[in-house]
Image (cartoon, rainbow, N blue to C red):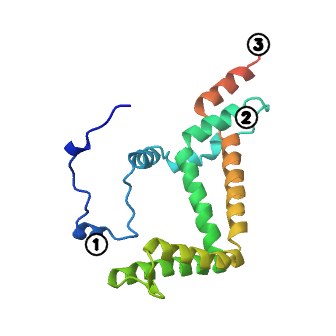
Amino acid sequence: MEKIDLSSLEGDINVPESQVKKRGIMALTLSSVSAREWLARTREGIKPWGEFINTSRFQVPKSVAPVPKRIMKNIEQFQSNYLFVFLGLVLFCVLTSPMLLIAIAACLGACYIINIKNHEKKLSIMGKELSVSQQYGAVGLCSFPLFWLAGAGSAVFWIIGASFFVIMLHASFYTQPEEGEEVDLMMDEVV
């Protein structure tokens, strides 16, 4: 096994205090290159909503055979639009469930208070200082029964089921332009 000389390595791993305070604990940063690339691809992949809901493009398949191919093409083409459909269903579910809305607000409020309080002074219980991650863990543990009472489990499964139904319905009935031409050509009779 080859030994590596670590004496020539240099670098400063200390983060300046001004940078830590500027970013904050709950700041959202996309430091991962793959996450930024995925977000950029998703933004570029959004098809116009007029094309997405063009009712003249919806046709019942003539047979079951072309349906899987049609579904795969539509999922590839409208992937970003389907993501927004999913997010819309999540928003609908949360807004129409007042108890779930209160539970989410309480959990986020507690996390916000932890964030603010830790800037002023660290929390200590019985002489032991708790880290921020331990405090967030405690909030998560305490909010679990609240989410259970609010019906978060059934909301998650409703969102998954409704998203699957709506997306599969759109993907199976939406015809691509080249698919429509093939169908027209196949329907011509030869005399």
Name the residue located 78 percent from the left edge and 32 percent from the top edge: 62
Disc nearer the start of the sequence (1/3): 1
Rendering coords of residue 79 (x, y %): 56, 45
For label 2, the SS is: helix
Q: Quadrant of the N terminus?
A: top left
Rendering coords of residue 102 (x, y %): 60, 81
For label 1, the SS is: helix
Amino acid marked by disc 1: Lys
Is residue 97 in sight in this rendering? no
Q: Quadrant of residue 19?
A: bottom left
Amino acid marked by disc 3: Val
Q: In the rendered view, would you say 149 is above or below 49?
A: below
Foreground mark, 2 or 1, reads 1
Which residue, given by chain and number where applicable, does mark 3 sit on?
190
Rendering coords of residue 171 (x, y %): 66, 42
Crowdedness near tag 3: few (<14), some (14–19) or many (≥20) residues, C-alpha within 10 Å: few
Which residue, given by chain and number where applicable, does mark 1 sit on?
21
Position of 110 with respect to 14 (left or right) is: right
Amino acid marked by disc 2: Val
Residues at marks 2 and 3, CA–CA distance in whole angstroms = 26 Å
Q: In the rendered view, would you say 32 is above or below 141?
A: above
Residues at marks 2 and 1, CA–CA distance in whole angstroms = 54 Å
For residue 67, which numbered disc appears in the image? 2
Crowdedness near tag 2: few (<14), some (14–19) or many (≥20) residues, C-alpha within 10 Å: some
**Residue in the foreground of this view, choosing between 66 and 160:** 160
Rendering coords of residue 44 (x, y %): 43, 44
Name, please, the residue furthest toward the top: 191
